Image: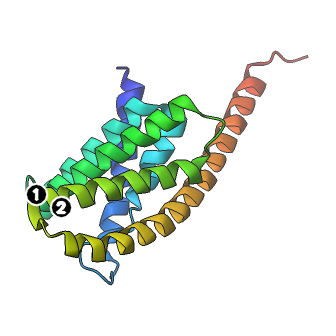
Amino acid sequence: MRLQDKYRIAVLSAYALALYGIESLLPTPIPWLRLGLANIITLVALILYGFRTAMTVTLIRVILASLFTGTFLGPSFILSMGGGVTSTAAMGLTYLVSKELFGPVGLSLIGAFFHNATQLTLAYFLFIQRIEAMLVVGPIIVLIGTLTGVANGAVSGLLIKNLLKKECRKIQNDNEDVRPAQ
């Protein structure tokens, strides 16, 4: 791995952690419900830099966030790690198989679905083990996950478009600097 790749992963991970921190300051109707703002960075990393970068950012974010909040290896860490890895893998596989079919919003919806499904499954088998509770809370989580998935995907799409535009301008400026004077 080149130094530039390590730097990119560090910066993206820092952005993801910052969004995680900002999100933790926002009030939520249900204590453990999160908007998934840090997943915006994962989606940007996936589309612009590939699956390996996206998964690395996800792993760094989940581990460091749990260390910062004191939940490392606890129930919320297990749920976050399971959901993060599964959603990143699902988005990565979808993007690999059909880049033209799904844009950022579609990928984000796929990620949100797999994240929520994994967390609900883990919560059921490891902690709750009451199907009634899962049937009550499951649809609420999936509905909110769908809404935040659309919003996060739209923000990711705008961010990707602006980053690509900025990169194109930089390349044009670099090319103009290299041209010989006439």
Q: Residue at x 26, y 61 (%)?
A: 120
Q: Residue at x 43, y 71 (%)?
A: 144
User: Residue 36 placed where, x, y %?
Assistant: 38, 62
Q: Residue furthest right?
A: 182
For the residues bearing labels 2 and 1, Cβ distance under 8 angstroms = yes
Q: Secondary structure at mark 2?
A: helix
What type is the residue that disc 1 sits on?
Leu
Vertical position of residue 153 compared to residue 8: above or below:
below
What type is the residue that disc 2 sits on?
Ala
Q: Residue at x 54, y 30 (%)?
A: 97
Mark 2: few/some/many CA within 10 Å (<14, 14-19, 20+): some
Vertical position of residue 125 compared to residue 50: above or below:
below
Vertical position of residue 56 compared to residue 116: above or below:
above
Vertical position of residue 158 compared to residue 169: above or below:
below
Tell me, for residue 95, which label it has, or none.
none
Q: Nearer the viewer, residue 116 or 18?
A: 116
Residue identifier under label 1: 126
Q: Residue at x 38, y 30 (%)?
A: 52
Residue identifier under label 2: 123
